[in-house]
Image (tube, rainbow, N blue to C red):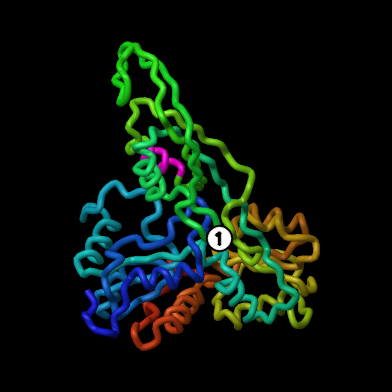
């Protein structure tokens, strides 16, 4: 735990700063950014930043007396069945918890932010005439309409909001409530909250409407059913066409831009290797092909090569496979796999700058010395 002095910062404050730059609503629906372990009210004075959590980074955090680790890749991603020493993951989390080290992630919410990694890579390459490579996909949202007896409406609404319903742009706890009559006949084997089995009822109810993201739909449905007094609550769920994410056009993945000078593919590859300090890259395309306009996407962007418009000469990303290169060759696109790690290793510096600027001397922000790509290249 942080020392109780003025230098300490509440974890919720750090989370707010990170999420004001990288809003969670900008994350992909499948993602899991945010506070993953720890107490949001805990106060910390030293933060360690890394690309992802490894055993070495857990040890580094313990040795350095760190109270919060911020990573890019969320460590808790798929549901965990147990947190015990029977698994490596469980042991790592227990070590963090026992040393009161919290864990926070900023993943695709950072990838898609306008002033984050793709802007940094583009700045390093000196790209001009920039545009976002892949605009943020429309937010998959649903409208949930539930009919609740008037007396229980506030409780049901509260439960749904707490589960994530009713977020529209920068507004939360958004709902619509209309009054009406709920009519039903209780079955002879029913156990009604209002009325008696076999009788027809007319109850003063409200129609409660909220927007729910695809990510929160299961959780909101469960919370609504638990809070609803009826044995068989009546509710409707519709998929929406409208985009309630409230993001500006500046959000999206990757960047397209023009190099300061045209160069051949082989020269461009040397340039990237030097500029980003990369040992080796894998690439396809004629080494003499002239490269002027390029697309960049940090991390695992191989599957988006076919989103390159015709004016893009080269696409730089990570995690490219055999078939990605084969397809790119057919299209005449120079596909450059600069590595998932090497296109993301600048992210900790970006997060550090954000935290240093927000908290200055109140927080010591250190970048992990144990970050490395999770494999070696033998050539
Ligand atoms: Zn990544």
Q: Is residue 118 left or right of residue 18?
A: right
**Residue at the spot 26% in from the left edge and 54% down from the top edge:** 87
In terms of image quadrants, where is residue 218? top left
- Pick whichever, 149 or 191, lies toward us: 149
Residue 278 vertical placement versus 175 (above, below): below
Q: Quadrant of the N terminus?
A: bottom left
Q: Is residue 112 visible?
A: yes
Q: Which residue is mark 1?
A: 300
Q: Determine whether 7 is above or below 55 in the image.
A: below
Residue sitting at x 47%, y 56%: 172
> Is ligand 1 closer than 8 angstroms to the Cβ of mark 1?
yes
Q: Left of 3 or right of it: where is 54?
A: right
**Residue 17: image x %, image y %?**
44, 73
Which residue range is magenta in the image? 217-224
Quick one: 20 or 48, which is closer to the camera? 20
Q: Eyeballing the image, is 333 above or below 242? A: below
């Amino acid at each position: 735990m942080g020392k109780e002095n003025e230098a300490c910062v509440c974890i919720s404050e750090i989370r707010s700063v990170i999420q004001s730059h990288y809003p969670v609503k900008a994350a992909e629906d499948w993602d899991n950014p945010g506070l993953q372990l720890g107490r949001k009210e805990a106060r910390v004075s030293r933060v360690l930043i890394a690309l992802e959590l490894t055993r070495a980074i857990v040890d580094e955090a313990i040795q350095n007396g760190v109270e919060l680790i911020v990573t890019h890749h969320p460590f808790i991603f798929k549901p965990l069945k147990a947190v015990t020493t029977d698994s490596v993951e469980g042991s790592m989390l227990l070590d963090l918890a026992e040393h009161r080290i919290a864990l926070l992630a900023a993943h695709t919410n950072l990838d898609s932010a306008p002033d984050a990694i793709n802007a940094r890579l583009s700045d390093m390459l000196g790209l001009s005439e920039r545009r976002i490579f892949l605009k943020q996909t429309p937010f998959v949202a649903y409208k949930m309409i539930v009919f609740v007896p008037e007396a229980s409406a506030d409780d049901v609404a509260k439960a749904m909001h707490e589960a994530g319903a009713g977020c529209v742009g920068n507004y939360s706890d958004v709902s619509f409530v209309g009054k009406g009559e709920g009519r039903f006949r209780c079955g002879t084997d029913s156990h009604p909250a209002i009325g008696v089995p076999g009788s027809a009822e007319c109850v003063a109810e409200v129609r409660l409407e909220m927007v729910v993201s695809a990510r929160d739909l299961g959780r909101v449905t469960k919370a609504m059913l638990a809070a609803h007094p009826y044995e068989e609550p009546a509710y409707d769920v519709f998929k929406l066409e409208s985009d309630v994410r409230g993001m500006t056009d500046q959000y999206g993945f990757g960047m397209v831009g023009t190099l300061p000078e045209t160069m051949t593919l082989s020269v461009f590859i040397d340039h990237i290797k030097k500029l980003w300090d990369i040992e080796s890259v894998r690439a396809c395309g004629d080494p003499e092909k002239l490269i002027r306009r390029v697309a960049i996407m940090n991390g695992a962007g191989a599957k988006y090569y076919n989103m390159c418009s015709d004016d893009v000469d080269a696409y730089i990303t990570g995690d490219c496979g055999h078939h990605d290169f084969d397809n790119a060759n057919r299209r005449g696109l120079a596909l450059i796999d600069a590595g998932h790690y090497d296109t993301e290793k600048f992210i900790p510096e970006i997060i550090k700058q954000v935290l240093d600027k927000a908290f200055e001397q109140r927080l010591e922000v250190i970048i992990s010395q144990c970050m490395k790509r999770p494999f070696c290249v033998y050539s």
